[in-house]
Each structure stands twice: as C-alpha cells, then as structure tokens.
Image: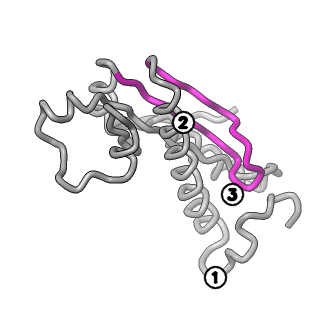
Amino acid sequence: EIFCLVLQDDGGVFPAMVVAASLALADAGVEVYDLVSAFSVAVIPRSMVEMSGEEDDDEDDYQNRSKGYCLLADPSAREMLASESGGGVLTIAMMKSWKEVVFWDQMGSLPSEVVLEASELCREGCGVMHRFMRQALVGDGQEDDADVPMEEQ
C-alpha cells in the first residue's frame, strides 16, 4: 500500500500523487514495467475566460484549435472550479515508454473534438513529466534510453 499526505491542495492533486507514488516505487527498487506519469487539462468555455478578462492576446495553439473552449494545462483549483460551469476536466495517467494509458478520468460533457485536443495535451504533459521523472531517478547525462521500457534495460 502507498499512502500520500496532501498538505495543500491547489489543484492537480491526483496527478501529483501518481507521479510521487511511481517515483517512490522505482526509487525503492520495486520492479515496475515503466514509470507512470499523469497530467490534467481543464476545459473552460471561451465565454467564461472572456468575461473574466484573463484571456491573453497571443493565444496558444490549443486555444485556437478548440472552438469555443480554452484548454488549460495543469489547472489550479480555481481553474478546475471554473471548468465545472459548462466545461470539464480530463486527467490521464500513462506509461510513456509503452504508450499505454492506464487511467482516464473525464468530468463534464464535452464535444468529441475538444476531448481529442485535451487528450493530446494530456499525453504531451505526461511525456514531459516522464522525462523529468527519469532525470530525477537516473541523474544527468544518462537519458540515451529514455523511450525504452524499463524491463528491457
């Protein structure tokens, strides 16, 4: 069993716990197929972002492709709360080297094209987290085999 104590919740607790548990198991020498990384994306209706006055002039690629919605990577608690009004939150955990999604949680009803965009952003976020996790475990300069599953190394 693994226990996680959350001292402060500013959103993104589940992905942080998944990363922490995966790193703890690997660091303890427990044999695992791969590190599991997790990432969340909040989907907020564009009208809510425009009303709050938080929209930037230089919108990123995901905001432009998701008609009527803004996708926010690694959302804060406030952004997750805002997504409950006509949007949603998508959380994915995956084993990057195996290209397998091991957890998928979606809150809110969203159009399929928006879910596809949010899942791509989650996958990219999991990839970034996976690189940071490997670097934390093996240190600098040893990332030549970063995309090879751990059991083959």
Residue depicted at x 61% and y 39%: 93
- Which of the two discs, 3 and 1, labels the residue nearer the N terminus? 3
The residue where tag 3 is placed is 27
Q: Tell me the amino acid under the disc marked 3.
A: Asp
Around disc 2, counting alpha carbons within 10 Å, would you say few (fewer than 14), some (14 to 19), or many (20 or more)? few
Nearer to me, 114 or 25: 114
Q: Tell me the kind of residue under disc 1.
A: Gly
Q: Quick one: which residue is furthest to the right in this view?
A: 152
Q: Closer to the observer: label 3 or label 1?
A: 1
Residue 147 drawn at (x, y percent): 73, 64
Q: Quick one: SS at disc 2?
A: helix
Quadrant of the rendering where the N terminus is positioned? top right
Q: Secondary structure at mark 1?
A: loop
Query: Nearer the N terminus, badge 2 or badge 3?
Result: 3
Q: Nearer the viewer, residue 62 or 52?
A: 62
Number of residues whose C-alpha sits closer than 10 Å to that of mark 3, classed few (under 14), some (14–19) or many (20 or more):
few
Kindly identify the amino acid type of the residue bearing the numbered disc 2: Leu
Read off the residue under disc 1.
141
Q: Main secondary structure of the magenta part?
A: strand
Q: Which residues are magenta?
A: 87-108
- Relative placement, left or right, of 121 versus 103 is left
Residue 60: x %, y % from top left: 32, 53
Residue 116 bears which disc, if any?
2
Q: Quadrant of residue 128?
A: bottom right
N-terminal-most mark, 2 or 1: 2
Closer to viewer: mark 2 or mark 1: 2
